[in-house]
Amino acid sequence: MGIPLREIYKQYCTELSGSYPVEEARNLVFWLFEAFLGCERKDLLLDRELPFIPGEMELALDKLKAGMPIQYVLGKAPFYGRTFQISPAVLVPRNETEELVHLILANHSGKLKILDLGTGSGCIAITLDLEWPESQVQALDISPEALAMARNNAAAMDASVRFFHADMLDTNLPLEMVDIMVSNPPYVLEQEKGGMHQNVLAHEPHSALFVPDHDPLRFYSAIARHARHYLNPGGYLYVEINETFGKEVSDLMSGTGLEEVRVYQDLMGKDRVVWGRKPTCLNAGSQPE
C-alpha cells in the first residue's frame, strides 16, 4: 500500500512552516515534488500514491529547513528561459538580472563583441551568446570555482563564450577591445546585512554580494576605468546597481567620460541598471532604439 501524496504534502508544508511563510513553504514543496517525483499539481489533486519517499527528497527537505536556498538544494536555477547549474560558489541568478540582459538584447544587434565582468554562473554571458548568435562573448571572474561552473553551463548549453580568470579590480586586465561591457558586481552594503534573509547570508558567496560601507562604488570605479580603456568608440557599458545608488553610479560614469548615461528602473520601479555610451561615432549595430 502506497503513501498518499496529499499526506506527504501536508507533512512537508508543516515541517517547512516553521522556517518559511505558508505560501512560500507550499511553493517549495511543489518544487521538491517536481524535482524528485516528477509530480505536477494535478497529481496532488488526484492524490496519487507513492510506494516510498525518496531519500534524496528527505535530505533536500532537511537542507531547506536549515535555510539553504532551494536553488542550491537542487543545484540549478532558472534564468531567461534556461536552467543553469549553480552551487554556493556563485550567486543565485535573479529576476532583476534578467531585465539587465533583456535591455541589452533590446538595444543592440549585429556582430558586436561583449565582455561580462564578474560572470559567476555565466548566466549573463551565456544568455547573451545564445540569444544573440552574431555576438562574440567573453567573460571573466576572480573565482576559479565560479569559472568552472560557468564553463560547465556553457558546455551543457553549447554556448561559445570565452572565459578567463581575472580580478576586475586589477588596473591592467588581459582584455581586447569590445563593443559592450556588462557587469553585475557586488553592490550590497555591509550595513544592509541586518535586513537580509538568513538563507542568503548563510549560503550565498559574500565576496559576490557585499562592498564596504565606506567604499560602495569600489567595483563601479574599476569598471568605468576599464570601459575608458577597453570599450571601442561608440561602445556601451551596462551595470546592475544597488537601488539606492542610481545617481551616484550615473554621476561616476558621466564623470569618467561616458555620454548619454541613463538609469533604468526594474519592474518594481527601483533603479536597477545604469548604462552609457563611450563618445564618438556609433556603429550602426550599436545604436539603441
Image (cartoon, rainbow, N blue to C red):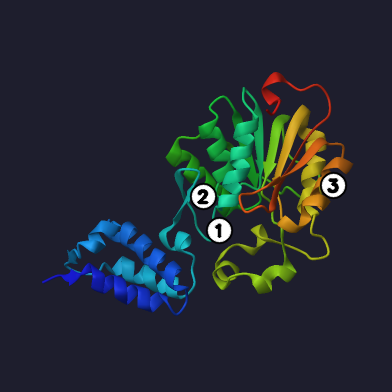
Instruction: Please state which of residues 218 and 163 is positioned toward the viewer in this rendering.
Output: 218
**Residue 39 in view:** no
Label 2, secondary structure: give it: helix
Q: Residue at x 56, y 51 (%)?
A: 95
- Residue at image position (38%, 78%) is 15
Q: Which residue is mark 2?
A: 149
Which residue shows up at 60% across the image and 62% down it? 205
Mark 3 element type: helix
Query: Mark 3 = which residue?
Result: 252
Which of pointers 1 and 3 lies earlier in the amino acid sequence?
Answer: 1
Mark 1 residue type: Ala
Q: Quadrant of the C terminus?
A: top right
The amino acid pointed to by label 3 is Leu
Q: Secondary structure at mark 1?
A: loop
Give yes or no for contact between labels 1 and 3 (Cβ–Cβ under 8 Å).
Answer: no
- In the picture, measured across the screen, residue 114 lies left or right of residue 82, that is right
User: Which numbered disc, 1 or 3, marks the residue closer to the eye?
Assistant: 3
- Residue occupying the far front of the picture: 269
Identity of the residue furthest to the left in this view:
1
Q: CA distance from mark 1 to mark 2?
A: 8 Å
Cβ–Cβ under 8 Å for marks 1 and 2: yes
Label placed on residue 89? 1
Q: Earlier in the sequence, mark 1 or mark 2?
A: 1
